């Protein structure tokens, strides 16, 4: 969710009319509002929730199809985040039927390790519709070269474009004083530590 909301905010800041369609119950809007409150420009992003979002909706997609129908007249492109979700497949099919392009961001879900998890289930899913969803995309949006290489190795016909995640410079400029981290965590001063960003 964090990548999608920040990307949407950046697109809105460029003057685009951006709507996030998400599978959240209406009562979750407060939680979404709190998690996005600090994102610069997110106030310009519209939020369209699918309700009721439950197991039946995940499998049958009735509310999803209705939501897609309502958004299609005002949409130029769909940016689909993820792969293994029936809702995403429904959106891709609706976009294609309307003649609208869509882009898929797999977020590592097409990595060999990820494909090895529940391998048979994913092979069946690819065969019954997800490969077609990927191949009919205007392009596959990889976040880096390491993600792009295995996607290309799958033989998916859609082009792969590497577009890294951006940052809002206003959130890191000016940088805090150099010793800020050590002041907050004095127990690490003078010791090596590993910083993991994901």
Image: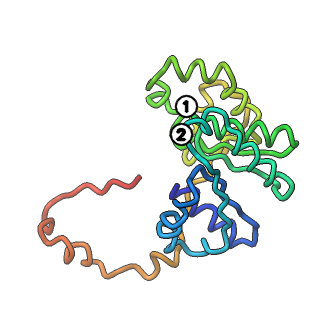
Q: Are marks 2 and 1 in contact (CB under 8 Å)?
A: yes
Count the marks.
2
Answer left or right for 11 relative to 153: right
Q: Nearer the viewer, residue 184 or 161?
A: 184
The residue located at (55%, 42%) in the rendering is 54
Protein image colouring: rainbow
Residue 14 x, y percent position in the rendering: 72, 71
Residue holding disc 2: 147
Q: Nearer the viewer, residue 48 or 27?
A: 27
Looking at the image, which residue is at 44% across and 26% down?
A: 117
Question: Which residue appears at 59% of the width and 18% of the height?
Answer: 124
Q: Position of residue 134 (x, y in %)?
A: 69, 33
Disc 1 secondary structure class = helix
Residue 167 image offset from top left, x and y in percent: 53, 66
Task: Identify the secondary structure beneath mark 2.
Answer: helix
Q: Residue at x 71, y 40 (%)?
A: 62
Q: Nearer the viewer, residue 159 or 74?
A: 74
Q: Quadrant of residue 150?
A: top right
| Label 1: few (<14), some (14–19) or many (≥20) C-alpha neighbours in 10 Å | some
Front one among 190 and 110: 110
Question: What residue is pinned by disc 1?
Answer: 150
């Amino acid at each position: 969710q964090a990548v999608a909301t920040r990307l949407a905010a950046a697109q809105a800041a460029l003057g685009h009319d951006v709507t996030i369609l998400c599978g959240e119950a209406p009562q979750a809007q407060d939680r979404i509002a709190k998690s996005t409150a600090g994102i610069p420009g997110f106030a310009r992003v519209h939020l369209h929730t699918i309700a009721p979002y439950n197991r039946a909706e995940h499998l049958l997609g009735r509310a999803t199809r209705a939501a897609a129908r309502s958004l299609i007249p005002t949409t130029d492109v769909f940016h689909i985040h993820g792969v293994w979700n029936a809702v995403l497949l429904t959106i891709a099919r609706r976009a294609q039927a309307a003649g609208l392009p869509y882009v898929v961001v797999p977020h590592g879900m097409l990595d060999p390790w990820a494909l090895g998890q529940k391998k048979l289930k994913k092979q069946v899913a690819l065969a019954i519709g997800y490969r077609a969803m990927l191949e009919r995309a205007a392009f596959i949006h990889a976040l880096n070269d390491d993600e792009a290489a295995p996607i290309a190795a799958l033989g998916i016909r859609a082009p792969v474009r590497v577009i890294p995640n951006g940052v809002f410079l206003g959130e890191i400029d000016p940088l805090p004083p150099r010793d800020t981290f050590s002041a907050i965590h004095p127990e690490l001063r003078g010791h090596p530590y590993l910083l993991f960003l994901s």
